[in-house]
Image (tube, grey):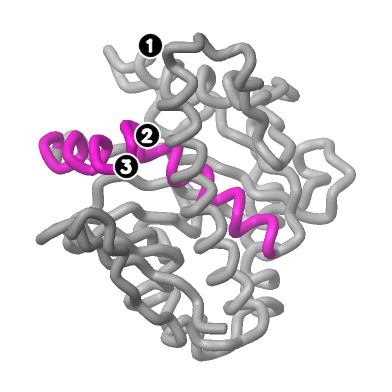
Amino acid sequence: MSLTTNDKLDIFSHHFNFLQHHFSFGNLHKLFNEGISLFSETDGSNAYAIKLVSSKNGEYEGLLSLAFTCNDIELAVVSFTIAPGKIFGLEQNEIAYVTRLQKSRAEKDLVNEATKYFKDIFLTSILLKALEAMLFAFDISTFAGVSAGNQVSGHMSGYQELFYVFYDETWITNGGILKNGEYILSLPLPHKSILLIKQTHRNRTVKKRNKLKEIYDCCSKNAQLIISDKQPETYVTFADNKSHNFSGKTIIAT
């Protein structure tokens, strides 16, 4: 779909009203400065994190971003804006409009290293799981995924096919239904029954899903802290001692 100027103004207004309603002044200050940490985990000298941040140039590709970082280097990002559902022909009062899904091409080695550490899960898939957790915490059960044809950089010469794979195919794989030029996705995102996975791949699939659930749970609890206006500084860190292999993980103090 082609958003009109009035549509964009309505989306921006709705988004900032949403932030004002759900975020305390302290959390807004963090959001627009250092960001709010939703998940972190260390592997030796590599400190991985998922942060909710205010987007750079957000008026073009989404006002908020979930950034996957390693030692504060951005490796992947998903950007979105909280929008009124009516703009997309939906009944929901508010949805997320996801307009950027990208991994870093400049940090290929770090991206590969992180992907390997996280059970060979694509970093963008990790971020979509984090987004799902955050949206559920805010009672948002639907998002619209931008199509390659409507993505702000989607018409770059020579990249049309790549953008189709990265956007349209991702949304279709996750159950997206094309409506007025954008993909509508319901949460939770579906996944294939384990019985439909090749038996030789099932063990690896279970490990991936368990890791994603761990990330989801952590992001969900930290998003709920935003809502309850408790500061995410109440994190505690523990060491997971398995075969003398320690890895620092972030959990919520209860």
Query: Which quadrant does the C terminus fall into?
Result: bottom right
Q: Secondary structure at mark 2?
A: loop
Q: Is residue 134 magenta?
A: yes
Q: What residue is pinned by disc 2?
A: 121
Q: Residue visible at 50% across and 76% down?
A: 252
Task: Identify the residue at image location x=68%, y=63%.
Answer: 137
Query: If you read the primary sequence from the N terminus, does the residue marked by circle 1 or circle 3 appear first?
Result: 3
Q: CA distance from mark 3 to mark 2?
A: 6 Å
Considering depth in this image, is 138 or 178 the residue closer to the camera?
Answer: 138
The part of the chain drawn in magenta is: 108-137
Q: Give the percent coordinates (x, y) of residue 95.
A: 72, 50
Q: Which residue is mark 1?
A: 161
Front disc: 2 or 1: 2
Q: Marks 2 and 1, Cα distance to the nearest angstrom?
A: 22 Å
Of 241 and 74, nearer the camera is: 241
Identify the image quadrant of residue 187.
Answer: top right
Is residue 148 among the parts visible in the rendering?
A: no
Up-down relation of residue 178 to residue 74 (above or below): above
- Horizontal and vertical percent position of residue 244: 18, 59
